Image (spheres, rainbow, N blue to C red):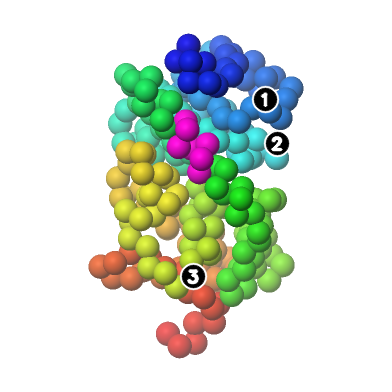
Amino acid sequence: MSLERAGHTVTGVATVAAARTALSATDTIDLALVDWMLPGGSGLELVRSLRKEEQTRRLPIIMLTARAEEEDISAGLDAGADDYISKPFSPKELVSRINALLRRTRDQLAISDALQVGSLFLNPQSHRVYTNELEVPLGHTEFKLLRCFMMHPERVFSRDQLLDQVWGNDTYIGERTVDVHILRLRKSLKPAKVDKMLETVRGAGYRLRATTDDSSH
């Protein structure tokens, strides 16, 4: 009711199977609100599966759940959710978070050109990353993190800035989450031998070097 009063059209489903049916039946759904505990399966697994499917890979997703521990929030975001709201919540905050995520999504779609830094090539349309024609498999969050770095090569980002740029400034997670995803991103880049492009700047944060060659180090 709160969302409809705010001008949104809402489709409600009660099970994981019904959610899959609703999403496959149309491409006009702009955002999904997903609870963790659902009949017929886990909301967390639903989010993971949506991130693997072409039709829903870029669908904005907010997890809305009673599980409020930092480990639960990290698990939800790691699975591919763009934001995480713990119950109890205020309808006004929910509407604000939805509007903020939809704005970020529109801004990202507006910047839809492919990016290249050194031998790294990122295609936001296909949601794929390549280096020397080798595809680099990345999770949803790692993709967004790398995209942020590739849009600003050589810029040093603090952990707070990365939280704001990648997760949004309304997401209540700790800086440790950034470090975890940096490690995961480096691990994904290592087989292609471009992991050293992602540098730690002591006392400041992280940056992506503009060249692949590290002969100067």
Q: Which residue is mark 3?
A: 153
The one of 14 and 155 positioned closer to us in this rendering? 155
Q: Residue furthest right?
A: 25
Question: Is label 3 in a helix, a strand or a loop?
Answer: loop
Q: Is residue 217 left or right of residue 143?
A: left
Residues tagged 1 and 2 counted as in contact (Cβ below 8 A) = yes
Residues tagged 2 and 3 counted as in contact (Cβ below 8 A) = no
Q: Residue at x 57, y 14 (%)?
A: 12
In front of the other: label 2 or label 3?
A: 3
Q: Write down the quadrant of residue 123 in the picture.
A: bottom right
- In the rendered image, residue 35, in percent from the top left (x then y), is placed at 47, 21
Among numbered discs 3 and 1, the one appearing first in the sequence: 1
Q: Which amino acid type corresponds to the residue marked 3 in the rendered image?
A: Pro
- In the rendered image, residue 197, in percent from the top left (x then y), is placed at 49, 72
Q: Is residue 26 left or right of residue 29?
A: right
Asked if one can make out residue 38 in the rendered structure from this viewpoint, the answer is no
Q: Which amino acid type corresponds to the residue marked 2 in the rendered image?
A: Gln
Q: Which amino acid type corresponds to the residue marked 1 in the rendered image?
A: Leu
Question: Is label 2 in a helix, a strand or a loop?
Answer: helix
Range of residues picked out in magenta: 98-104
Q: Is residue 74 left or right of residue 19?
A: left
CA gap, disc 2 to disc 3? 30 Å
Q: Which residue is mark 2?
A: 55
Q: Residues within 10 Å of mark 2 (few under 14, many from 20)?
A: few
CA gap, disc 1 to disc 2? 9 Å
> Residue 23 got which mark?
1
Q: Residue at x 25, y 68 (%)?
A: 203
CA gap, disc 3 to disc 1? 36 Å
Query: In the picture shown, does residue 74 fall above or below 29?
Result: below
